[in-house]
Amino acid sequence: MNFTLVYTTEQKPSILPDTSEQIQCQDNQCIEQEALGSYGIQKLYCQPTGCFSIAYEYAPYQKLVLDFSDGIKRTSNVFATPDKLRNNFQVIVGKNDLHIELVPSPKEVNSLLRVDAWSSLLIILLLEFMAAWAYLSYTRKSYRILISVFFVNLITMPVSWQILANWITEPWLLWSFCLVFEAVFLWLFNRNRLHLRDAFNLSIAINVTSYTLGMILSFLLAPYLF
């Protein structure tokens, strides 16, 4: 979730990240609530002028509690969690409160430039390259296939998480797309070295490795990446 601030106040106080929080609510009155907290990469990330959050799974409703440099901690209205993987909101900053509205078609900076995106790509490339090397060593296939593994990840990562995530709501569908696309890509560019079945086996090996080990690494590296 990306939050862009729009001030209606004369002054434009900056956000105090350490004392601001996103609240998870189970109902539209936020009677049952808990902080989003910090869990691996799950957290509300704030700069003085805006925030974004990442969660493994969001509750049905949310609200923001932002602490500002003018000494006022402002609380937003309760808003529903949209049925999309990536969402953008406009946060209207009033004198004492916040009002949050969903922005359907935002004009935002490319989120692939954020540290969580490019660091994830580097981790994926490293893990899948190592998994592919192990698979090719075991099956005695040409190491030239590693070049295709590198380039196909440069395609699937931005296509799946930057473009398809705007319409697909289930992460497993995006993961399945990557698995099938990468298998076909590897086969097409290595038909003299790989059978289609081998290409699918290789794609399964690299994607399972990057998903499982990537989740573990996200917990370990998150405090240093964000």
Image (tube, rainbow, N blue to C red):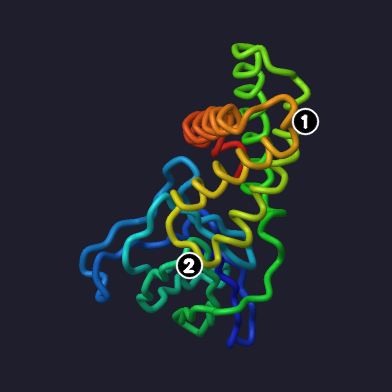
Name above or below for residue 72 compared with residue 92.
Answer: above
- The residue that label 1 is drawn on is 147
Q: Residue at x 68, y 41 (%)?
A: 185
Between disc 1 and disc 2, the foreground one is 1
| Residue 210 marker | none
Where residue 196 sits, quadrant-wise, is top right
Spot occupied by residue 8 in the image (x, y as percentages of width and height): 58, 87
Q: Residue at x 68, y 17 (%)?
A: 141
Name above or below for residue 128 compared with residue 141.
Answer: below
Q: 16 or 50, which is in the foreground?
A: 50
Where residue 169 sits, quadrant-wise, is bottom left
Mark 1 Cα-neighbour bin, 10 Å: few <14, some 14–19, many ≥20: few
| Residue 66 marker | 2
Left or right of residue 5, residue 34 in this image: left
**Residue type at numbered disc 2:** Leu
Q: 191 or 178, which is in the foreground?
A: 191
Quadrant containing the C terminus is top right
Name above or below for residue 71 compared with residue 221.
Answer: below
Spot occupied by residue 165 in the image (x, y as percentages of width and height): 54, 60
User: Does dot 1 land on a helix, a strand or a loop?
Assistant: helix
Spot occupied by residue 46 in the image (x, y as percentages of width and height): 57, 59
Given the current orientation, which residue lies at the most extreme left position? 31
Left or right of residue 159, residue 150 in this image: right
User: Does dot 2 land on a helix, a strand or a loop?
Assistant: strand
Mark pair 1, 2: CA separation:
46 Å
Mark before the other along the chain sequence, 1 or 2: 2
Q: 33 or 17, which is in the foreground?
A: 33
